[in-house]
Structures are given as C-alpha cells and as structure tokens.
C-alpha cells in the first residue's frame, strides 16, 4: 500500500477529513461533516467522525496514523496546538491539539488553514518547484500563507501570514473603522472579505444608498454576494463601481506590499471574491502593478490556486 497521510480542514461550517497519498497528493478518500455545535468538545467529536468516515472510505479503518495534520480557520500559536482566535467558530485560546490527540489517539499538528493550503500548493499545486511563494485568498475571509526558503513560514509565535488583519483604516479616519470578526478595528478583512462586503452593502442600501443592486436581486438582499456586486459594476452602477475601486485599492496595495517586502517568485491567488469577480480582479491587478516595487516584480508570476478546495486538506495531511 502506498504511503498515506491523514489531514483535516476545519472551517466554521464543517470539518473535512481526507486520506492523502504522500507521493502523488491524490485524495484517496474524504468525508465532510457539518458542525451542529461549535463548542470545542462538539467540534472534536465532529472531526473524529469525519476522520473515521474518511478512513473507512479508504479501507484504512483499522490503520493507525502516526500523526494527523489539521488546518484551522483561525490564528494558531505555533506548534503548541492552541487556537488563539477562530472567529467563525467563536473560539479564543482553545487547546485543540491536546483535545484532538486525546480523542484520536495520535499526534496532531495544528496550523492555520491558509498555511496548510500554501503547503499543499507548494507540494502538488501552483507553487510546486518554487521555494518562495505567497498564497493570498480572498473569500468569506482574507488571509495568506507564506513559503520562504522552501519551508512553511509560521513566524515567531506561529501567526505569520495574517494578511487579513493588517490595519488599513486608522482610528483617526473621518469615518469610524469597521470592526473585524477578530474583534479588532480597521482590518483588511473587514473591508474586502465576502461576508463583510455583503454586510456593508446591506447597511448602506438600507441607509438610502442608490444602486441597481436591489433590482438585480429582485429586492432580496439576502442573496447579495461579491459576484452580484461585480455584475452591477460591469453594468456601470456608480455605487458598485465606487465600492470596487475602494476594495481593489486596498487589496492591490496589500498584495503589492507583501511582494515588495518578501520578494517571492510566485503569488498564488484564490478564494471566491478574487477568482469569482473578474472586474474586481482586473482592478486589483492594475493597482498591484502600480504599487509594487519594480525590482520585486522582476521574475514574479501570478497564478490561480491549482488545487482549489482540496489545497487545505492536502496541505494539512503533509504538514511537517
């Protein structure tokens, strides 16, 4: 039997476990289990059920894995297994690694979900063969994963790569900065993630902003998404275009700053907001090209994430 590894992608909605072929990166079997309760104890049980189902699907139900890798949508304290802050789960300072080790009977390696995704792309995706790469995801949240010198870069306390929590709106601005899901004010994620964009637009339309978004949605603002804003902008809606200009400026500048600082060989872009909104992506590219250091741009390539939704669980399984 080929060497296999076990990984878990733990988000705010569900836990997905997968058995992965170490040599090819192929997912042999996987199982997704929804959260019915987001308390740590309940989530540990959800993960255990997902793991058992994935093992059964791979014919490995009786097999013992020496270690399980887990990518978590939150800030993780290095290799301690402690999740410092996971807004989508409502967690603070949860010793997830310890809890899972006791439940699964195996060593557990905890990492941020985008660090895990970056490692998956490094091993078998868009960053394969590249020693210095940055993964940037803009979807329901905003984050990045860093590959530096061929290794996953966690930083001093394990929280490197939190691009979504770089502050882009100072508290002394003319309007009060928006609060992020992490609890802090003025974060990039608070202005550019899919969830926060939808919340902001609903607020502004309810306050009287003029836009054709209401007509596009036939009055049902619960269906609002970044792709609908993108469509409205393409149709020339002034409100949507002004919003996209602001969002593109923030994202393009943030990505340019990361490239200028770290000088990667490749930037890998993913997430539904970046990849599902062509007009926004075009605007982000324009801002990026205008703001990035010319010297850091030499030899740089921008690629779409290759592994898609599988990147996180593949990378988690192969974490070192």
Image (spheres, rainbow, N blue to C red):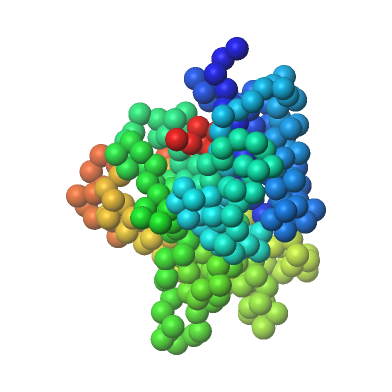
- Name the residue located 75 percent from the left edge and 52 percent from the top edge: 42
Numbered marks: total? 0
Is 260 left, or right, of 80 in this rendering? left
Compared with 138, 150 (above or below) is above
Residue furthest to the top in view is 1
Q: Quadrant of residue 197?
A: bottom right
- Name the residue located 27 percent from the left edge and 55 percent from the top edge: 261
Is 141 left, or right, of 39 in this rendering? left
- Name the residue located 50 percent from the left edge and 76 percent from the top edge: 185
Q: In the depicted view, which residue is nearer to us: 232 or 130?
A: 130
- Whether residue 159 is visible, yes or no, is yes
Residue furthest to the left in view is 295
Name the quarter where the C terminus is drawn: top left
Compared with 136, 191 (above or below) is below
What is the x, y in percent for residue 15?
69, 44
- Whether residue 141 is visible, yes or no, is no
What is the x, y in percent for residue 265?
30, 40
Compared with 121, 243 (above or below) is below
What is the x, y in percent for residue 83?
55, 56
Q: In the depicted view, which residue is nearer to us: 123 or 84?
A: 84
What is the x, y in percent for residue 166?
42, 66
Q: In the depicted view, which residue is nearer to us: 67 or 173?
A: 67
Q: In the depicted view, which residue is nearer to us: 108 or 306?
A: 108
Name the quarter where the N terminus is drawn: top right
Compared with 206, 296 (above or below) is above
Is 187 left, or right, of 222 in this rendering? left
């Amino acid at each position: 039997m080929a060497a296999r590894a076990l990984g878990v992608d733990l988000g705010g909605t569900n836990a997905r476990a997968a058995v992965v072929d170490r040599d090819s990166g192929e997912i042999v079997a996987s199982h997704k289990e929804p959260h019915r309760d987001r308390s740590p104890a309940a989530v540990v049980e959800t993960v255990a059920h997902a793991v058992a189902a994935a093992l059964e699907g791979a014919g490995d139900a009786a097999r013992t894995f020496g270690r399980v890798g887990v990518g978590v949508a939150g800030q993780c304290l290095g290799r301690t297994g402690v999740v410092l802050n996971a807004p989508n789960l409502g967690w603070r300072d949860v010793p997830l690694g310890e809890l899972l080790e006791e439940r699964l009977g195996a060593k557990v390696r905890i990492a941020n979900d985008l660090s895990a995704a970056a490692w998956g792309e490094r091993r078998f995706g868009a960053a394969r063969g590249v020693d210095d790469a940055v993964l940037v995801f803009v979807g329901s949240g905003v984050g990045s994963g860093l590959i530096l010198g061929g290794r996953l870069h966690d930083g001093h306390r394990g929280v490197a790569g939190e691009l979504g929590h770089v502050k882009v709106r100072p508290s002394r601005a003319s309007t009060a900065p928006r609060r992020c899901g992490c609890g802090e004010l003025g974060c990039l994620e608070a202005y550019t993630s899919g969830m926060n964009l939808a919340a902001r637009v609903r607020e502004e339309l309810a306050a009287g902003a003029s836009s054709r978004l209401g007509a596009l949605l036939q009055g049902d603002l619960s269906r609002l998404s970044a792709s609908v804003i993108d469509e409205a902008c393409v149709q020339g809606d002034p409100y949507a275009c002004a919003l996209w200009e602001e969002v593109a400026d923030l994202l393009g500048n943030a990505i340019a700053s990361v490239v200028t600082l770290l000088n990667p060989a490749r930037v890998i872009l993913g997430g539904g907001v970046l990849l599902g909104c062509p007009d926004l992506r075009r605007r982000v590219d324009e801002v990026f090209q205008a703001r990035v250091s010319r010297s850091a741009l030499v030899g740089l390539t921008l690629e779409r994430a290759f592994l898609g939704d599988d990147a996180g669980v593949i990378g988690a399984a192969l974490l070192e």
